[in-house]
Every structure is written in structure tokens, then in C-alpha cells.
């Protein structure tokens, strides 16, 4: 059997060295990348944003929200409004009185509930917001939320922003008015429990620390809306630091929906 020549031995040795060199290089690069990633993750707190110099004003959401922002029904036709009542039920389930009493505390003072003195990882307490406080719009007195009477309710909520103190010490209030259509057709408006968001529910400390936090809700009842009239209604947040007239973001500080109520 012929022995390998010196050139073949040298070639095999060079190939082995070539393989070892690149194996070591890629192992080094992988280790360096892993180390950098570890240092980055170690330096980032899971409890608050690293860069939070500018806090945007809050947006607003509403319920029911099934087919865009359109509410159209006939009071005498159960099938036309049942979906809205069901949506309200689902939305308010976390606010049931028993759930709130079990998980959250009763707060009496209407001022910011500051808990910054606690350690970063310690769980924050949350104030109760009970469903029964929503009165005629709670679904407890009237399981149809006024839809069967042609007096529909909607629920409004400010978006959560970590660490945000709305209103600079003064509660943010809510107003609703006709944007398109005859203004008088909207009739009287009722707010539950109040027409503003109380300060005691702020600031929000994030889902890792504010585990049982319940965003406050303002319920709006349109108690005298005119039948068979197409209306576009806009509800706005009002207060210091609030933007509710942005031409590019229709959800910033306000929500607009169409309302068509028939007999």
C-alpha cells in the first residue's frame, strides 16, 4: 500500500488547522454575543421603561366595541341590541363587587396613590372600582344596560400609561356631544359614578407590580336620544396635559362613534 506523500499530509494538516481556527472564531463570537446580550438584559428593569423622558397623553377606549365604533339598534328588537349587552357583561366581569373586595383595597382619599417608597419588585396595592358604582349602567339594576328602553349606556376608559399622573393634580373629566347631526337629538346625558377619573387610581405601576389593578371607568347613559336620527357622537377627555383634537390620531384623548336608535 502506498504511503501518503508529504504534500497530502501537509494539506490535511492545513485543513484541520483551518477548521479549528474558524471553529474557535465562531465560538468566540457566539460567546461575545451571548455576553453582550446578558449584560443588556441584566441592565434593563422589567418594571419600568429604560427611556421614559416623554410620556404621551392617554388615549381612550369604549365598550361596547363590536363592529367598529357603530351602535345601531331598535329598542323593541332584542336581537338587534343583545350583542351590545353581552359585550358590556364581558367588559365589566372583572369589576364585579365580590372580585374587587377580594383583590383590592377600599380607598377614601382622592389623591394620587403613590407607592414609590416600596422596593422595585414589591407588589403594589390597587384601589377598588366596583361594578355597582355604575348605577343604571352597571347591568345589575338593568341587565340590558338601557338598550331595551332606547337609553343606551357606553363605558369609557383611559388607556394605561406606566407612571402617568393625569391632570397634574386635578381629575380628568369627560364630556360627550354631537359631532355630526342635530345637537338637540342627543338629549340628556348621565354619568356614573362621576364624570371624571379620580386621582386615587394613579399612577399605574405596570402589570408585574400592579397585578390586580382595575382601570377606572366612566359610564355614559344617553337617556333622551331621539329615535331614527343618525348621530356621530364624540366623547373627550379634558384636563391639563390632555390632547383631544389630534388630526392624525382619532383615539388620542377622545373616541367617536355613530349612534342610531330606533323604536
Image (cartoon, helix red, strand yellow):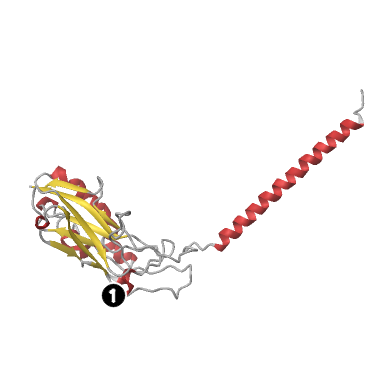
Q: Quadrant of residue 113?
A: bottom left
Residue 97 as seen in the image, left or right of residue 184: right
110 and 182: which one is in front? 182
Residue 13 x %, y %: 85, 37
Residue 17 as seen in the image, left or right of residue 115: right
Residue receiving disc 1 = 110
Residue 120 as seen in the image, left or right of residue 127: right
Q: Quadrant of residue 206?
A: bottom left
The residue at the point 49 percent across, 61 percent down is: 46
The residue at the point 21 percent across, 46 percent down is: 83
The residue at the point 66 percent across, 49 percent down is: 30
130 and 215: which one is in front? 215
Q: Quadrant of the N terminus?
A: top right
240 w.r.t. 64: above or below: below
Residue 74 x %, y %: 11, 46
Residue 45 x %, y %: 51, 63
The residue at the point 27 percent across, 58 percent down is: 254
- Looking at the rendered structure, the secondary structure element under dot 1 is loop
Seen as rendered, the residue at the extreme front is: 247
Amino acid at each position: 500500500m502506498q504511503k501518503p506523500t508529504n504534500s497530502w499530509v501537509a494539506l490535511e494538516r492545513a485543513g484541520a488547522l483551518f477548521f479549528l481556527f474558524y471553529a474557535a472564531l465562531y465560538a468566540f463570537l457566539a460567546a461575545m454575543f451571548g455576553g453582550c446580550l446578558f449584560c443588556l438584559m441584566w441592565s434593563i428593569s422589567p418594571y419600568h421603561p429604560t427611556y421614559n423622558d416623554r410620556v404621551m397623553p392617554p388615549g381612550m377606549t369604549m365598550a361596547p366595541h363590536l363592529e367598529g365604533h357603530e351602535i345601531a339598534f331598535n329598542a323593541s328588537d332584542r336581537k338587534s341590541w343583545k350583542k351590545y349587552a353581552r359585550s358590556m357583561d364581558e367588559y365589566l366581569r372583572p369589576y364585579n363587587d365580590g372580585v374587587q373586595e377580594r383583590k383590592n383595597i377600599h380607598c377614601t382619599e382622592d389623591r394620587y396613590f403613590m407607592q414609590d417608597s416600596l422596593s422595585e419588585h414589591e407588589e403594589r396595592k390597587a384601589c377598588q372600582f366596583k361594578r355597582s358604582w355604575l348605577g343604571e349602567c352597571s347591568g345589575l339594576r338593568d341587565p340590558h344596560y338601557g338598550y331595551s328602553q332606547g337609553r343606551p349606556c357606553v363605558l369609557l376608559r383611559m388607556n394605561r400609561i406606566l407612571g402617568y399622573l393625569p391632570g397634574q393634580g386635578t381629575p380628568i373629566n369627560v364630556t360627550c356631544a354631537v359631532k355630526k347631526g342635530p345637537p338637540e337629538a342627543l338629549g340628556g346625558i348621565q354619568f356614573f359614578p362621576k364624570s371624571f377619573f379620580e386621582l386615587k387610581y394613579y399612577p399605574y405601576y405596570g402589570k408585574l407590580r400592579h397585578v390586580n389593578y382595575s382601570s377606572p371607568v366612566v359610564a355614559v347613559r344617553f337617556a333622551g336620544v331621539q329615535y331614527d336620527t343618525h348621530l356621530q357622537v364624540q366623547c373627550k377627555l379634558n384636563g391639563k396635559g390632555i390632547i383631544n383634537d389630534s388630526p392624525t390620531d382619532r383615539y388620542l384623548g377622545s373616541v367617536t362613534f355613530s349612534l342610531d336608535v330606533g323604536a
